[in-house]
Amino acid sequence: MAEPDVDVSALPQEVREQLAELDLELSEGDITQKGYEKKRAKVLAPYLTQTQNLVPPPAYDEQSPGPSSASASAPEPGPSNSSSSSSRHRHTRRPHRSGGTRDERYRSDIHTEAVQAALAKHKEEKMALPMPTKRRSAYVQSPIDNCTPPDSSSSSDDEAVSSESAEPQHSPDTWINSSLHGSSTSSSASSTLSHGESRPTQPTHPHSQQVPPPPAPAHPPHSHSQPSALAEAFAQTRIDPVGVGPPDMPSQAQARGSRVDLPPNAVVRGMSRGQSRSSMMETADGVPVSSRVSTKIQQLLNTLKRPKRPPLSEFFMDDQEEIVEVPQVDPNTPKPEGRQIIPVKGEPLGVVSNWPPALQAALTRWGATQGKSPALTALDITGKPLYTLTYGKLWSRSVKLAYTLLNKLGTKNEQILKPGDRVALVYPNSDPAMFWVAFYGCLLAEVIPVPIEVPLSRKDAGSSQVGFLLGSCGVGLALTSEICLKGLPKTPTGEILQFKGWPRLKWVVTDSKYLTKPSKDWQPHIPTANTDTAYIEYKASKEGTVMGVAVSKVAMLTHCQALTQACNYCEGETLVNVLDFKKDMGLWHGVLTSVMNRIHTISVPYAVMKACPQSWVQRVHIHKARVALVKCRDLHWAMMAHRDQRDTSLASLRMLIVADGANPWSVSSCDAFLNVFQAHGLKPEVICPCATSPEAMTVAIRRPGVAGAPLPARAILSMTGLSHGVIRVNTEDKNSALTVQDVGHVMPGALMCIVKPDGPPMLCKTDEIGEIVVNSRAGGTMYYGLSGVTKNTFEVIPVNASGTPIGEIPFVRSGLLGFVGPGSLIFVVGKNEGLLMVSGRRHNADDLVATALAVEPVKTVYRGR
């Protein structure tokens, strides 16, 4: 199909934009050549009739020189200018506007050959440059409006040299090829323009008919110089970004000269209207394409052009001489050699006739029959008794709180709380009585208490993590005391501050004067212990996340029964509790098991311990306490302050429970405390370390011994073997040994085994250290609201060496690392969360504490590994 001859520059703006879009689609391959020609002819059809009526331009007079392109102007308007005369003037100016033609009289074959040699040399230099980038000269910029759509009439430089009157090519493929051949010329043009010469602003007419240029005089008054003509020719063409240096660097074109010849009939085309030079780029082979299509292709080519990554060994070159290799496994590394471990069973859980069917039933019994029996004694900051809460008061206040929670917090038709909802208990460590009332009030109302710490400020370090716990548990109401509520941070309007990460809570004060006394016919519903959740205990992981371990009602009751049997608790005993009563051993022994057995608990707050470290020893001496709940720190502080109190006696103690007895430094504290207070009546067999975890609760505890019976043997282990997870009796000097004390036997009614801490829960060998897993009714059931994490912790089924499950009953991961010693004694050497792997060897974070404590001025020192 013949291309219609229409002056594109004279067309309306929207028509030129349509032609530019057609050229862009053709260059990108979105349209065929035939379709392109049909659509282009359809767009230009209304303007074809005008161009067909035009007459050919008259012959130029050789005697009259034409005006230059720089000074060309429109003819003076006359009273009657016809369309033919205007067309004649337009064709007259056309040869001078082309800007790229050159008179044949100034053509030189020698100069042409020199230019071609310079271009070839420039092309070789360009191939050695780095990969193309989008950086280009700042001097070669032209407005988008001056760019005309590319047509198919351009030809390459080589074709222009050989033929001066070649027919215009109408295929866009030749337009792309001409840009490929002319890329080096474009680079030269950009170098020429960078010398500061101005370029003309007249647009070219790509569709104008080519006519022979008229002969010009020897020295035309307004003729362009060669660089200026070249700049005019390339002002609207693509500039190769590779050949153009930054504006602040000297151009390489100065070394090749500033004169570049063009063939007289070579017409340089511009870009499509609607495109900018920033949208055009070159591939690795120098072909200009649209960045909208070839950006990813360009990135792929750049990646393929990069050198290959050197081998891994070359990254470990040390002074270009040595290669640091990965350490090889020592063939002398100790490996487990024993047989596969057999699960260890605890003694059967006995059945006592007077055990209550639920923990709330025990409170009901003691409140009705032993109302004046002391349940709790709280101390003030000086260590003196502040008040005593009897079982009768505990029962009555708990019933009033349960009635208030279920009937007085909302409207008569719609209450805020209903059985099964979760509520937060926010009480300080110095107010155990209010916490006891709130906890048992929630149990009687069948709502689930979630004890948490009191927030100190809005940006408290653990505030957001506690908020995650409250959010996962769906807590919307918080119980607190009046004193604690006044101490919480508030807004200027007096409202409780919205803590970071916390859900919006409704605060309820549980002081007795704010509670409503129930009617005589209202009694709390106390069902038999079942699998419903009784309370949620918070647990912080090593990442800082706070999760809630749900404990069912039957697990809570079974755990109290197991502790009663293991510790041989009796009614009316006195217990001194130095631990936190909101969680762990302080909650299990000091709040739950004590009420089940009608034990009198004396709570020693942590603030009192800081002011008077020996206050708990004084309480044991004054109240003739039979049991004491302490940590190694309490033993250490009391030992350091024992000189102030010489008349104390610990002869009444039958059981000194060390809550963190599983830590490797506990043996040092226990031995040092015994050496100091044995003269005050302390017996060696009363020290009972234990191992616990929030998920498995009490894993093992040493039973109170009989007077005169031999003490359990201790394990003196090789630290080298422990670092490889293997049990080896130390045969070397004392400095390479770790002394570990046992934590007693498995809890009654429980089944325990040791599995590998990594990978599938495969049973360990008898001389191998692994994670302790427990199956028992007295344990946690799940992470509340986190079903994904629950399965990996609370539903573990151990397998043997062949991968076959040992049974169908699920075990719970305790997070404790240890082994089973002689006589089924349990030894704990660390925690899974504190495990450190260094060069294939195991270390534990607790070892750092043990090593630091080894330099304390105590009489008995056992080093950590």
Image (cartoon, rainbow, N blue to C red):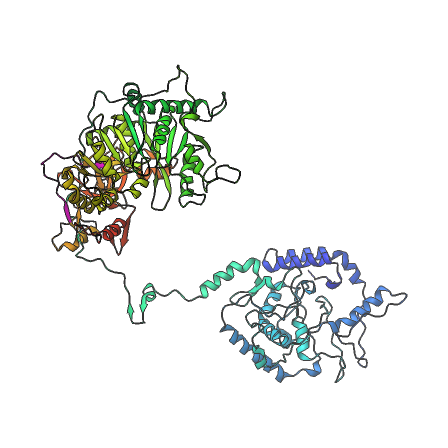
Left or right relative to 9: residue 806? left
The extreme right residue here reads: 79
Residue 91 magenta-highlighted: no
Observer-nearest residue: 728 or 135? 728
Q: Quadrant of residue 144?
A: bottom right
Left or right relative to 761: residue 138? right
Q: Which residues are magenta?
A: 699-716
**Which residue: 72% across, 68% down?**
203
Q: What is the number of callouts on the image?
A: 0
Observer-nearest residue: 415 or 270? 415
For the N terminus, give its image quadrant: bottom right
Q: Quadrant of residue 788?
A: top left
Observer-nearest residue: 81 or 335? 335
Q: Position of residue 202 (x, y in %)?
A: 73, 69
Q: Is residue 70 visible?
A: yes
**Which residue: 74% across, 76% down?**
213
Residue 708 magenta-highlighted: yes
Q: Quadrant of residue 267?
A: bottom right
Q: Position of residue 33 (x, y in %)?
A: 63, 58
Left or right relative to 160: residue 73? right
Q: Is residue 337 visible?
A: no
Position of residue 15 relative to residue 781, above or below, is below
Position of residue 353 relative to residue 286, above or below, is above
Q: Position of residue 471 (x, y in %)?
A: 43, 37
Q: Main secondary structure of the magenta part?
A: loop
**Which residue: 50% across, 68% down?**
131
Q: Position of residue 677 (x, y in %)?
A: 17, 42
